[in-house]
Amino acid sequence: MERGRFITFEGIDGAGKSTQIDVIEKALRDRGIEVIRTREPGGTPLSETIRRELLSVDMDPATETLLFFASRAEHLAQVIRPALARGAWVLSDRFTDATYAYQVGGRGFPAEKVESLEAWTHGDLQPDCTVLFDLPPEVAAERLARARQADRFEQEDCEFFTRVRNAYLTRAHQQPHRFMIVDSTQDKEVVSAHLREVFSQWQ
């Protein structure tokens, strides 16, 4: 059986990922494709437990990074790899690019350590496409303030999110074959129409 597609969605908090994942999920399901929608950290009972701690408890950057990869290892073993093996399409709200953006870019954690953890945890498995929703941190903060109570990461200041955004853009420019950068300052219906068009061409 042909391997399924692995599509990830990235961007700073408040960039509008969830709304657009809804759009893509529906478009794919309408085509009769089996879709597994998941998130990081999370996606399994154990990973969701780790998520709760990561989003609420202050911790050392090394601990934080290791917990993200512990959650990711379980997620890969229990959800992502089995789904891809049976031909399903996996839509994940964040994956390892988020660790490079938030822990390396935002926290200043050494990139070479993340590279080692990445190689150990998922080897050569990479998303077929990563949709990066790009948005100035000031705009994202305004959206978040209207949307929900902020978690530990969302409470970081604008300088933190500027570093995160820059790290995302650097990674996208380093791997242009994999990344699709979406301007999230556009009207959400414009973004949705663009994404539906792009993924309608995927088989």
Image: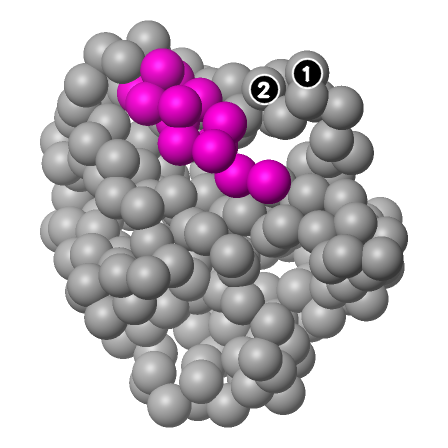
Q: Main secondary structure of the magenta part?
A: helix
Q: Is residue 102 magenta?
A: no
Badge 2 element = helix
Left or right of 29? Residue 158 is left
Dot 2 corresponds to which residue?
27
Left or right of 27? Residue 200 is left
Which quadrant of the rendered structure holds the N terminus?
A: bottom right
For residue 136, above or below residue 179: above
Residue 147 visible somewhere in the drawing: yes
Residue 68 percent across, percent down from the top left: 58, 65
The one nearer the camera, 3 or 21, is 3
- The disc label shown at residue 117, or none: none
Residue 14 visible somewhere in the drawing: no
For residue 127, above or below residue 49: below
Q: CA distance from mark 2 to mark 1?
A: 5 Å
Identify which amino acid the numbered label 1 is placed on: Asp
Q: Where is residue 168, by image quadrant?
A: bottom left
Callouts 2 and 1 close, C-beta under 8 Å: yes
> Quick one: label 2, few (<14), some, or many (20+) residues within 10 Å?
some
Badge 1 element = helix
Which quadrant of the rendered structure holds the C terminus?
A: top right
Dot 1 corresponds to which residue?
30
Q: Which residues are magenta?
A: 191-203
Residue drawn where x is 63% and y is 50% of the image = 5
Identify which amino acid the numbered label 2 is placed on: Ala
The one nearer the camera, 91 or 52, is 91
Residue drawn where x is 16% and y is 43% of the image = 158
Residue 38 percent across, percent down from the top left: 68, 41
